Image: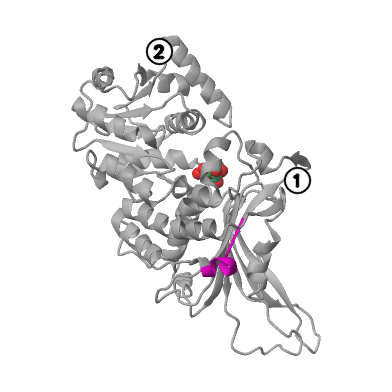
Amino acid sequence: MQKRKKTQNITFVLLGIMGDLSRRKLLPALYQLEVAGLLSEDISVVGVARERLQPDTFVELVTQALSQHVSEPVQAAAVKRLLARMQYVALDLHEVKAYAALKQALGSCHTAIYYCAIPSSVYAAVCQGLAAHGLIRPQSRLVIEKPIGADLVSAQAINASISDFFTEQQTYRIDHYLGKETVQNLICLRFANPILAHLWDNRCIEHVQITLAEAVGVENRGNYFDQAGQMRDMVQNHLLQILTLFAMDPPVDLQADHIRDEKVKVMKALRPMSAHDLSANAVLGQYQAGVIENQPCAGYLEDVQQPSSRTDTFVALKLFIDNWRWAGVPFYVRSGKRMQQKRTEIVIYFKESPCNLYRNVMDTLPQNKLTIRLQPDEGIDIQMLNKVAGLDDQFQLAASKLDMRLNQSEYRPSPRVADAYERLILEVIKGHQALFVRKDEIEIAWQWIDQIMAAWQQSQHPPKPYPAGSSGPLAASTLLAQDGRAWHE
Ligand code: BG6
């Protein structure tokens, strides 16, 4: 346990404490920070929800959420310490007058962090309620969650509804992928290893593949997902964030805005995809019934009870970043639900050598390939060619791997990997914005996604079917096969 540090009398206000996100992620994250001794003594937590609850019932509900969603046995002493910092306020977030109760709970708090674990349609009401009671001060912070809009117009409306009350420096937009250890390690890998930094462009890299595959379906979020689809749920945010971290130029330093400026430049360089480009460069799919890990799974239409839904549960794109560094390098990206297994990885294929000295034993030398496995089984491996030991006249070559497994103890001082939300909550408390998404990033990302979705709607093509437990529709393989390539499986 680390020594508790003093901060500056911070109150973490969890709006929507009875909701799914709070119960599954935020309360367990606060608990883990408590266990690790990372919450200073002057941090308190105010939980807000509409229900009127007796103090005992609130304690019971928090304890229940922790025992359900903390993966290891819950430590009673840490729960007790966490509960000692907590209080509950029942209020209807749409009622301006009701915020008086929150004001009273905040008392002499210096810095309030308002974490909105609530639908974005309520953000404006929250800002107005807080402002009416003088609860927004220059040091206050607002944390908001995805989805931030369903297109550019709705994202702009959400951003506008909060920007009258909170400045950009006070606003923390969560993309939880940025809180994952291995996503942060991507920045370190790139900029702490000059050997890689020198290879990171179109002179050395032939193409790049990014996969965000999930085995889960839509779970109990069918209503939301059927409006969103995989392009809006995963590609607009998590996938584009990984892409921009992978492709950005080195920032001048690690300050939040310097990193975010570089990410924005990559987004601006994404080549637009017209209706004409769509058929050659994009595949949208929808899962049908199938089998995952020997368990039968229903198809999407049955899962959401919408027999004629055309919502995409799989997306594969061939995209280009039209800038000096990446001109001409195809990026093949894909993301899908109900695929074979959970797997997030980046695979970089390097260009072939200009001349094959081993053509008498191998017609074509396999490309060097760098794989960055983000989850699960985090690690990095490089495919290399070696001489097979022996006295044969002719060299025999074999491909082998330099394999660095990040889940091994030398890279991981503690066996437990912190959940993304633990890191993100700590960063908000410290007032560091590097792991949060800036307004312009969100809006440019939507602009790029919107034109693909508009072209797709216009095409009237239904999504391509694929069986649950597969690696997506056949057309996704064709997307690479037409360029003489295949997905890394
Ligand atoms: C969320 C999406 O943002 O990310 C979900 O809304 C998805 O649909 C989830 O399943 C994946 O996150 P993770 O951390 O499990 O990779």
Mark 2 nearby-residue class (10 Å; few <14, some 14–19, many ≥20): few
Q: Does the beta carbon at disc 1 come under 8 Å from ligand 1?
A: no
The answer to whether residue 113 shows anywhere in this view is no
**Residue 50 percent across, percent down from the top left:** 39, 19
**Prevailing SS of the magenta stretch:** helix
Residue at mark 1:
290
**Residue 46 percent across, percent down from the top left:** 34, 23
Residue at figure coordinates x 20%, y 23% from the top left: 108
The answer to whether residue 409 shows anywhere in this view is yes
Q: Which residue is more in the foreground, 162 or 45? A: 162
User: Magenta stretch: residue 280 in it?
Assistant: yes
**Residue 192 percent across, percent down from the top left:** 42, 64
Which three-letter amino acid code belongs to the residue tagged 1?
Answer: Gly
Residue at figure coordinates x 45%, y 76% from the top left: 327
Which three-letter amino acid code belongs to the residue tagged 2?
Answer: Arg
Mark 2 and mark 1: Cα distance apart in space: 44 Å
Q: Which residue is more in the foreground, 432 or 228? A: 228
How many marks the image carries: the answer is: 2
- Helix, strand or loop status at disc 2: loop
Question: Residue 140 lies in what quarter of the image?
Answer: top left
- Helix, strand or loop status at disc 1: strand
Q: Is residue 195 left or right of residue 13?
A: right
Q: Which residue is more in the foreground, 361 or 149? A: 149
User: Magenta stretch: residue 138 in it?
Assistant: no
Residue at mark 2:
52
Residue at figure coordinates x 55%, y 41% from the top left: 225
- Report the image quarter containing ligand 1: top right
